[in-house]
Amino acid sequence: MTSYKELGLVNTKEMFAKAVKGGYAIPAFNFNTMEQMQAIVQAAVKTNSPVIMQVSKGARNYANGTILRYMAQGAVEYAKELGCKNPQIVLHLDHGDSFELCKDCIDNGFSSVMIDGSHLPYEENIALTKKVVEYAHAHDVTVEAELGVLAGVEDEVSAEHSTYTKPEEVVDFSTRTGCDSLAISIGTSHGAYKFKPEQCTRNAAGKLVPPPLAFDVLEAIEKQLPGFPIVLHGSSSVPQDEVDTINSNGGKLPDAVGIPEEQLRKASKSAVCKINIDSDSRLAMTAAVRKYFNEHPDHFDPRQYLKPARENMQKMYEHKIIEVLGSNDKL
Ligand code: G3H
Ligand code: 13P
Ligand code: ZN
């Protein structure tokens, strides 16, 4: 048993309370590689921001759960080395799908877990979430639950049909489960293709303009649960300059489209206090690597092409923190 406290990590409790009160959101960035971890820490330290580093089941399969946990421990030490006196870093399990997986993470140094029972019938979601909450709270670990189903497909996380969260269920769900935060469905989705072209309009330049998020549903949820921490998954904005760089350097991502940043900025000022971003990091990394290979076909040292990839991700993370979520200077 390794407690996250031994690793210098924190849970989300205080962080979320401050974020809800202060009208900003904490960035939750997924990581699978050392370069992502370094870029996240550098961006958080440079901007004086708390940060959630999250690990999906797919990341555990790719990089190994133990390695990722040690990387998070290293992240805390690295932040201090970069001059941050009091790093506020959460190690979070993203989309946990069973009690056993959540328990394994809690027993191995995670400070926060998500139990995603959103695909289950309502009462089963409650029962599973409650079981995880009981175990997690006994170890001072915070729990994110999900109500409502996101659209979209991304590796291990998929949902064919989306349904918005029902505001009339949130009080009953949060009271009976005891969860610390609630992920809701208001029109975001996972991956780089969040909307089908036929769901969008096109601007003068021919680029897709997605439909707006359901802010009325968010407001109704806030009314039911004043001050309760709300989480948005699937919140990459799929920056068109990165997509264009990928496509003009041999890639093929036609009609990739995300959530406009103005809408995420608006959500950050509400009870939404955690915003999940993964795809934008994948795009930033891929764009930099593709460009590098195109410009330097004779290079083959991974450090040569991963350095610009890391720099490009760091730039993106800083932009999100300062311009979109507003979590800068909150340490
Ligand atoms: O919500 C999904 C995250 O982007 C993680 O994706 O399962 O491919 O690691 P992944
Ligand atoms: P994106 O695919 O929009 O980055 O969403 C990531 C996410 O929700 C991780 O849980
Ligand atoms: Zn997600």
Image (cartoon, rainbow, N blue to C red):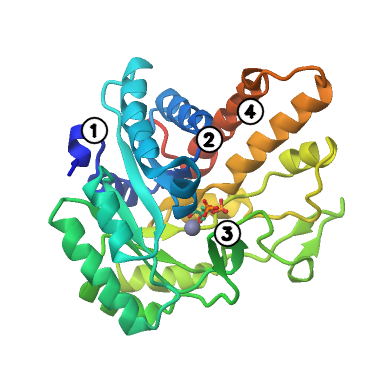
**Ligand 2 is within 8 Å of the C-beta of the residue at disc 3:** yes
Q: Is residue 114 shown above or below 43?
A: below
Distance from disc 3 to disc 2, alpha carbons, whole Å, reads 18 Å
Task: Say whether disc 1 or disc 2 marks the residue closer to the N-terminus.
Answer: 1
Could you tell me if the residues under marks 4 and 2 are in contact, i.e. CB atoms within 8 Å? no
Quick one: SS at disc 3?
A: loop
Q: Closer to the camera: disc 3 or disc 2? A: 3
Could you tell me if the residues under marks 3 and 4 are in contact, i.e. CB atoms within 8 Å? no
135 sits to left or right of 259: left
Residue 207 image-quadrant placement: bottom right
Q: Residue at x 82, y 22 (%)?
A: 297
Task: Say whether disc 3 or disc 4 marks the residue closer to the N-terminus.
Answer: 3
95 sits to left or right of 316: left
Quick one: SS at disc 1?
A: helix
Q: Residue at x 31, y 83 (%)?
A: 123
Residue receiving disc 3: 190
Task: Say whether disc 4 or disc 2 marks the residue closer to the N-terminus.
Answer: 4
Residue receiving disc 2: 317
Residue 146 appears at what percent x and percent y? 39, 67
Q: Closer to the camera: disc 4 or disc 2? A: 4
Task: Say whether disc 4 or disc 1 marks the residue closer to the N-terminus.
Answer: 1
Instruction: Count residues near mark 3 (Cα–Cα under 10 Å), then give few for <14, some for 14-19, many for 20+.
Output: many
Distance from disc 4 to disc 1, alpha carbons, whole Å, reads 28 Å
Task: Say whether disc 3 or disc 1 marks the residue closer to the N-terminus.
Answer: 1
Residue receiving disc 1: 7
Distance from disc 3 to disc 1, alpha carbons, whole Å, reads 30 Å
Distance from disc 4 to disc 2, alpha carbons, whole Å, reads 12 Å
Kind of residue sitting beneath label 2? Tyr
Kind of residue sitting beneath label 4? Ala
Q: Residue at x 29, y 65 (%)?
A: 99
63 sits to left or right of 239: left
Kind of residue sitting beneath label 3? His
